[in-house]
Image (cartoon, rainbow, N blue to C red):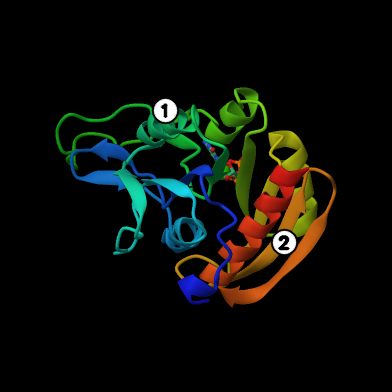
């Protein structure tokens, strides 16, 4: 949609959005990362700014994306850096959207020097430590009336479908809204379009048909606006 065709229904609303994928260093040249492009989070930031919101975007690693017009952008790398930035910005926010792909684990040790291979040493084993669950912390510390939105990228498996996993995740996380994307087979990551479901804590479930990420962003903001009106 053209910016001037969008409603200004987020005027004065302070939103924080995390986007992209974190990187957890192994040594000075290597890291554990993920395939998040950041495009969906950036689209959310762009659309929110166009609808009048005060936007802070906490951006982890993305494909080359321009900073969205009108947003304050803070660039971070690791899950811990993203955590600090999101919590600091969230203290005065009305809405927090966790679109970032946050590493669940980080290497327990970060080598000071480049890890070398050697014929007389055993090959290294990477031990992982758990990262804090930022979304869970946001839900726990939320200010009165603050809306917290989570994302879930799911593949179905032998324990259940994409939707089964997503419904369980919404309950477990305690967020107000959960944007669910089916992933795998080239879906969602890095693509221009997205599809899935929007699940509400009030048990509402809205299918999100395959559409450009900006369109999906608009649907998410529509849902946030109606959530704030309740
Ligand atoms: N998330 C977070 N902090 C983490 C991991 C995830 O805030 N350490 C957020 C993501 O930004 C997303 C939501 O939690 O909004 C769901 O992430 P997801 O990876 O789908 O859920 P997990 O609880 O990590 O479960 P799992 O990866 O085991 O499916
Ligand atoms: Ca995870």
Local crowd size for mark 2, using a 10 Å CA cut-off: few (<14), some (14–19), many (≥20): some
Dot label at residue 88: 1
Local crowd size for mark 1, using a 10 Å CA cut-off: few (<14), some (14–19), many (≥20): few
Name the side, left or right, on which 193 lies relative to 146: left
Q: Nearer the viewer, residue 121 or 189?
A: 189
Q: Quadrant of ligand 2?
A: top right
> The C terminus is located in which quarter?
top right
Dot label at residue 197: 2
Name the side, left or right, on which 67 lies relative to 199: left
Q: Residue at x 41, y 61 (%)?
A: 37
Q: Position of residue 145 (x, y in %)?
A: 67, 32
Q: Nearer the viewer, residue 143 or 32?
A: 143
Q: Position of residue 135 (x, y in %)?
A: 58, 35
The residues tagged by marks 2 and 1 sit, at their Cα atoms, a distance apart of: 29 Å
Residue 159 can be seen, yes or no: no
Task: Kindly state the secondary structure of the residue where label 2 is placed.
Answer: strand
């Amino acid at each position: 949609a053209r910016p001037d065709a969008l409603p200004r229904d987020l005027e004065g609303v302070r939103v924080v959005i995390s986007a992209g994928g974190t990187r957890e260093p192994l040594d000075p040249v290597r890291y554990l990362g993920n395939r998040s492009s950041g495009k969906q989070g950036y689209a959310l930031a762009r659309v929110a700014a166009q609808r009048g919101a005060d936007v802070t975007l906490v951006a982890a690693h993305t494909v080359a994306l321009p900073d969205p017009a009108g947003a304050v952008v803070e660039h971070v790398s690791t899950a811990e850096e993203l955590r600090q930035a999101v919590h600091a910005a969230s203290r005065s926010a009305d809405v927090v959207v966790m679109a970032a792909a946050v590493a669940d684990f980080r290497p327990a040790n970060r080598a000071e020097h480049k890890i070398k291979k050697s014929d007389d040493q055993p090959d290294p084993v990477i031990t992982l430590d758990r990262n804090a669950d930022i979304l869970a912390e946001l839900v726990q510390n939320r200010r009165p009336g603050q809306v917290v939105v989570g994302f879930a990228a799911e593949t179905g498996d032998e324990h259940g479908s994409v939707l089964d996993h997503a419904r369980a995740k919404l309950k477990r996380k305690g967020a107000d809204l959960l944007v669910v994307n089916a992933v795998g087979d080239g879906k969602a990551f890095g693509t221009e379009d997205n599809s899935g479901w929007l699940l509400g804590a009030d048990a509402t479930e809205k299918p999100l048909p395959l559409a450009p990420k900006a369109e999906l962003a608009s649907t998410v903001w529509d849902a946030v606006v109606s959530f704030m009106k309740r």
